[in-house]
Image (cartoon, coloured by chain):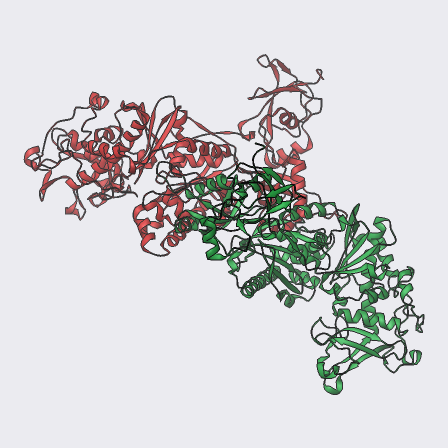
Chain colours: A green, B red
Amino acid sequence: MSNDPLVVFTPSGKRGRFPVGTPVLTAARQLGVDLDSVCGGRGICSKCQITPGYGEFSKHGVTVREDALSEWNAVEARYDEKRGLKPGRRLGCQAQIMGDVLIDVPPESQVHKQVVRKAASARVIEMDPATRLYFVEVDEPDMHEPTGDFERLARALREQWEIPEIAVDLSLLAKLQPVLRKGKFQVTVALHKGHRDTVARVLEIWPGLHESGLFGLAIDLGSTTIAAHLTDLETGEVKASSGIMNPQIRFGEDLMSRVSYAMMNPGGDREMTAAVRDAINTLAGEIAGEAGIDAGLIVETVFVCNPVMHHLLLGIDPVELGQAPFALATSGSLTLEARQLDLAAINPRARVYILPCIAGHVGADCAAVALSEEPGKSEDLALIVDVGTNAEILLGDKTRVLACSSPTGPAFEGAQISSGQRAAPGAIEAIRIDPVTKEPRFRVIGCDKWSDEDGFDEEVGAGGITGICGSGIIEAVAELRMAGLLDEGGLIGSAEATGTARMQAEGRTHAYLVHDGTEHGGPRITVTQGDIRAIQLAKSALYAGARLLMDERGVDKVDRVVLAGAFGAHISPLHAMVLGMIPDVPLDKVTSAGNAAGTGARIALCNVAARAEIERVVGQITKVETAIEPKFQEHFVAANAIPHKTDPFPELRKIVSLPSPSFNTHGEGDGEGGRRRRRRG
Amino acid sequence: MSNDPLVVFTPSGKRGRFPVGTPVLTAARQLGVDLDSVCGGRGICSKCQITPGYGEFSKHGVTVREDALSEWNAVEARYDEKRGLKPGRRLGCQAQIMGDVLIDVPPESQVHKQVVRKAASARVIEMDPATRLYFVEVDEPDMHEPTGDFERLARALREQWEIPEIAVDLSLLAKLQPVLRKGKFQVTVALHKGHRDTVARVLEIWPGLHESGLFGLAIDLGSTTIAAHLTDLETGEVKASSGIMNPQIRFGEDLMSRVSYAMMNPGGDREMTAAVRDAINTLAGEIAGEAGIDAGLIVETVFVCNPVMHHLLLGIDPVELGQAPFALATSGSLTLEARQLDLAAINPRARVYILPCIAGHVGADCAAVALSEEPGKSEDLALIVDVGTNAEILLGDKTRVLACSSPTGPAFEGAQISSGQRAAPGAIEAIRIDPVTKEPRFRVIGCDKWSDEDGFDEEVGAGGITGICGSGIIEAVAELRMAGLLDEGGLIGSAEATGTARMQAEGRTHAYLVHDGTEHGGPRITVTQGDIRAIQLAKSALYAGARLLMDERGVDKVDRVVLAGAFGAHISPLHAMVLGMIPDVPLDKVTSAGNAAGTGARIALCNVAARAEIERVVGQITKVETAIEPKFQEHFVAANAIPHKTDPFPELRKIVSLPSPSFNTHGEGDGEGGRRRRRRG
C-alpha cells in the first residue's frame, strides 16, 4: 500500500495514497476533499475540474512528474471542444492518478465555496445550500420486478449518491414518468434537505443533465418596501436585486394602522395577505426577468420581516400583535411550500424558509440582523440598532445577547415631520448650519453638490427640493443644537434670542427656515418646534431601549454601535450622537452594517447550517419587553434632552462643544419629556 | 411499599401496588393498562370510566372492601347529573385507591378496543387510529417570556401528554389564536401521527373539550362505483355506508378505454381526475349528512383502488399503465393532505392514506384484500380471487404469497353479454334449468321469489325483467352445461340436438331463450353463442392466472378458494366450479369474503400499525406478470373448455355428473380457445 502514489490536495492540504488508476474525484471523495460533482463522475457535468501541479513542491513534500496523471482522454477532449476547458485544467472524474501528484481544487469546483459579502465587514458566506442538483441513471421498468418509477428513482439516488430516502410532491409525481422517458431514464433532480429534515425532497426534475442552475430569493419584507436578492444557489452570486413598494401601504402607512385595519374590517387581514403575496409574485417575476432566468428555477426563498409582516404573509390575523401581551401565533422558524403562500411566480414546489421571531415586536428581521452581525461572537460589547418605524435593538458579546424593540414611531423616516418625506430624489438628506452666520447649506438626494456650491441650483432646480428625509431631519436637529439655535431641552430660540432672521415665529413657538422655494412654486421648508418634539420622542425611545438592555446587562457603556438598516447606512454618526440617539462611544466605533437583515436573509438562503444556528441563537437571546419595564419610562424622560439630561456623553464632548443656551420662557421644554406616545409600527 | 394497596385490572390482569390516594387512572397508566382519557385526568371527558368489583375474588387473590376506593366526589356527581354515569361506574381520574381493589376496564373505556367485523370471518379490528384527541391547558402568553402561542401549545402537549414534537399547517396556525382565547387557553386538538411520522401533526383544534368525535372515510374507489364507509375513529363503528357511480364512466366504460381517452385527448387525464375528485366530494358530503355529522370532523381517509384509478385520483396520467411494461409512477403507499386531492368537502387538513400497489395491474385494492384476508398468515394454501373487470389473484400461506392480475374483461359484470346488464333491480341474478324439461326458472334482483313461484309475475311485472347480471350469466352458462344444452367446448346445441324449442337458431349458431317479455314491451332475454364465448374468455383468463401462480408455487391444487369483491359475494360456488372459473376444491372450501378490499380499507383506517404491516407484506409478495409468462397462453387455451380440457376436477365430479354431448358440426368449439383478446380494464 505504501508504494501507491501520494496525492496531495490544495488548498485543503488533505493527502493520501491511492492505487494507480484511481480517478482524482474518487480520491477526493475518500479523503473528504470538497470537490463538486453533479453527474457523479460520468464526465458530463464538468463541475469537478482540478488543476494538477507539476514539479517539486517541497512544502508538500511531493515531486510531481509529467505523467503523474493519466493522459487527456476522449471525454475530456469532447468536453474541451464543446465547452472549452481552461488551460491546465482536467476533469477530476476522468484524470487518473498514475504517480505522486499535487491537485489544486479551484474555488469554482468547491461545493462549499466562500462568497465575499458586499457589506463593509469582510465576512464571507460559505455556500452550503439546502437544495442541490444530482444527476442519476434510473433503472428502466421491469415487469419481473414491478416497482414504480418513483421507487426506482429513489433507489438510484440511494445507490449513486447515498441519499437514504426521498419524498416527492404529487405535482412532481405527475411529471415524473414523461421526464424519465424523455431523458431516457437519465435525469437531474433538485433535492432539498432542510436542517431539520430526515428525508430529502425532490423539488424539480429535468431530463438529462440540467445545466441552467438553481436559484433562490432572499426577501426582506418591510412595511414600506419589499426587497429581493436573486441568488445563484451554486455560486452564491447575486444575479439581480430589486425592490417594490409594499402594497399594504394603502391599508395603513405604519404597522399599527394595518393592525387597526384588520381589527376594524372583517377580512381586512386577508386583503392585506393577498396584496403582499401578489406583490411578491410580481417582484419575483420581475427579478427573474431582469436576470434572464426562468422563474421556475427559483427553488428556495428566505423571508425576513417584522412580526406584523410575518403574520400577514402567513395569512394570520395580526390582531394579537396590536395589544398586550403582543402574543405571536408562532415564534419559531417555518419551512413551507411556495404554494402555501400562493407564490405562483416561482417553482410551485419551492421551499420557503422564514427565520424565527424573537418576540412580539422583535421579528425575523432582527433575527436576520443577529445572523449577519453575530453579536454573540463579538469580543467587545456591541449595540446593534436596526432603525426603522420600530427600532430593534441587540446588545451583546460572546457571553450573552439581549434584544428589545422600541417604539420610535415613523419620525426617523420623515413621517410626522412638517416638511418630512421619504428618502427620494428632492429630499434634503444632509444639512450643515454655520455656527456663526446660522445659515444652512444642504444636499438633496439625486444631486452630488451642496446647496452653496456652484451649479447646485441648475442641477436640482428650485422645485426639485421637495422636503426633508429621515437622515436630513436628524442632521438638521443636531446642527440646530450645535449652532446654538436649539437648547438642551429642545426649544427653538426666537429670532431675537438667536440673532438670525431664519427663525420665524409660528404661534407661540419658532421654526427654522431651511429653504424657501415658494417663488418658484416649490415648498417652504422649515424645521418646526413640532418637528423637534417628534424627533425627541423618537430618539428618546431608541435611547431608552438601548439603556434598558444595558441595565439588564449591568453596564453603563458599550464598546461599539452598529447602525443597521438601509436608513442606518445614511445616518451621520456624529449627528446621531449629538442628538443623543445612541449611547456615547468614540465616533470611529459607530459603524454602518448596511441592510444587515437582507444580508442575514442571504446567509440563510446560501447556508442551511446557518438556519439551525440562528434558531439556536434566537432561543438563547434574552428578550426584554420595553412595554412592561418601569425603567423604560424613566430612561425615556431622561433621554428627552439633547443629547441627554444626565448621561455626560464624554466621547462626544471630546470632539464637539455644545452651546448652552436656554430658550425656556414659558416653562416648556424642561426636559420632562412632554407627551409620550407609544407607537408600534 | 408492600403495605400499599394492591390493584388488579381486568381484563388485562395487570396488577401492582400503589400508595393510598393514587387515582385509578394514574395506576392504570403506570401499569400500561389500556384506559382511555382525552382530558388527561381533569374529570371532564369521562373516557376513563371503570367498574370496581367488591367482595372476594379468589382467582385474582384479592378481597375488596366497600371503602377500597375514595368516596364519590363532586366531579363525579356533577358529571353524573349532567350526563349520567352507568350504575357501578366511577371516573378513573377521580376515584382514588384506598385499599386492595379489582378494577374492570369496560370495552368503551379502552383505547385499543376491538371491533368485530361484519364479514363472515370472525376477525376483529383493533382500534389504533393515527388521529386522536388530546385536551390540554396551554400557558397564557407572558411578555417576560415571549414565545408564540403555537410553541406554548407544543409545550403543553409535551408536558401533559409526552408528545415530543408537533407540526401545524398554516391554515390551522391562522385559527390558533382565536380558538385558544375562546377556550380560555383550554383546547382539544386532533393529533395525527402516521406510522412513518416522527412528528405529530395538529389537524384540528377546538376551544374547550371537543365531544363530537372524530371520523374517517374508508373509500373503495372502483372503476364503476365509489363506495365509502364513514367510521367513528374512537369506536370503530361504521356510522354510514354509501356509494356513488364513478363519473369517469362517461370517459370510458372500462379501465382501458379510460386510459385510451387520456392518450387520445390532451388533458383527458385531468378531466377524469377532476371528475372523480368531484364525485368523492359529493359522496363525502352525502355520507356525512346521512350520519348527521359535520364533514369537517372527517380527519382521515383511506383509499383502495386499482392502479388506473390510483393514478387518476392522484392526478397522474395513466398512459404508462396502458402499455408494457405497465410502469406505475409510484408503487409505494402515500400519505397526503386532503387539499392535495382537492377534497374540500372534508376537513382541509385531513390526512389521506393510500395503500401501496403491488404491480402495474395489481393495485392498492388487492393490497387491501391481502390486509383483510391475510393469506400470509394462512395455515393452508388459499387462493383469493377478487373478481372484477380485472381479476386480482393472491395465492399463499404462511411461507409465501404470490399475486397476479388476469385480464378477464367485463363479461363477469354483464358487459359484452347480449342481454347483459349491471347488477340492479330487474336483472336476472340466479337461474336454474331443469335437466329434463330444459325449462328455466330464475330470480331477479329486487324480488325474493323464483320465477316459477306464485305471485312472481305480479311482484316484478313483465317489464321488470331487464337483463342478466354477472352472477346470472355465470349460472346460466353452468346450468346450460349441466342440462346438456352446452358441450364441453362451449357450443350451444340446436333445438333438434337438444330437443327443446328454447334453442333458437341465430345465423349459424344457437341461443337459449331465458325469457321473452316482448308481449309486454319487455326485452327478449337469451344466452347466445357469443355470450358463451365471452364468458369462456373471461373464465379462462381467471383460471389461467390462478394456475400460473400455482405453477410458480409448484402446486397443482389449492386447499381453499376465497371469492372477494362485492360480485364475489353473489357468485354461486357450485356454478363457478362447473364453469371452471376456479380450481377444483371441495365445495365447502369456497367461501366469500364479501368486499374484502373495503374491509382492508377500514382496517387501515382504524389501525395505523396495519399500514406498516401491509407495506411490509406487499414488499414480500412475489409478483407474477401474466402478460410475459409464456405458460399463461397455454393455461388459457386449456381452460377454454367447460370446466376444463385437461384438469379432471375430481371434487366437482363427486357432486355433479356433467353430460357429454358434442355439438361440434362445423369444426368450431374444439377447445383451441378461439380469439383471445387481452383486455385490461
Q: Quadrant of residue B230?
A: top left
Q: Position of residue A11 (x, y in %)?
A: 64, 47
Residue B161 shows in the view: yes
Question: Along the line of sight, which residue is nearer the eye, A86 or B10?
Answer: A86
Compared to residue A630, the image places residue A145 above or below, namely above
Question: Along the line of sight, which residue is nearer the eye, A367 or A607?
Answer: A607
Left or right relative to B302: residue A327: right
Left or right relative to B655: residue A654: right
Left or right relative to B503: residue B128: right
Residue found farthest to the bottom? A519
Compared to residue A482, the image places residue A270 above or below, namely above
- Residue at 85 percent of width and 76 percent of height: A433
Q: Position of residue A105 (x, y in %)?
A: 60, 48
Q: Where is residue B111 in the image (x, y as percent from the top left)?
A: 55, 31
Q: How many marks?
A: 0
Q: Position of residue A439 (x, y in %)?
A: 85, 79
Q: In which quarter of the image is residue A368?
A: bottom right
Quadrant showing the N terminus of chain B: top right
Quadrant showing the C terminus of chain B: top left
Compared to residue A593, the image places residue A497 above or below, namely below
Residue B449 shows in the view: no
Residue found farthest to the left? B496
Q: In which quarter of the image is residue B308?
A: top left
- Residue at 80 percent of width and 74 percent of height: A431
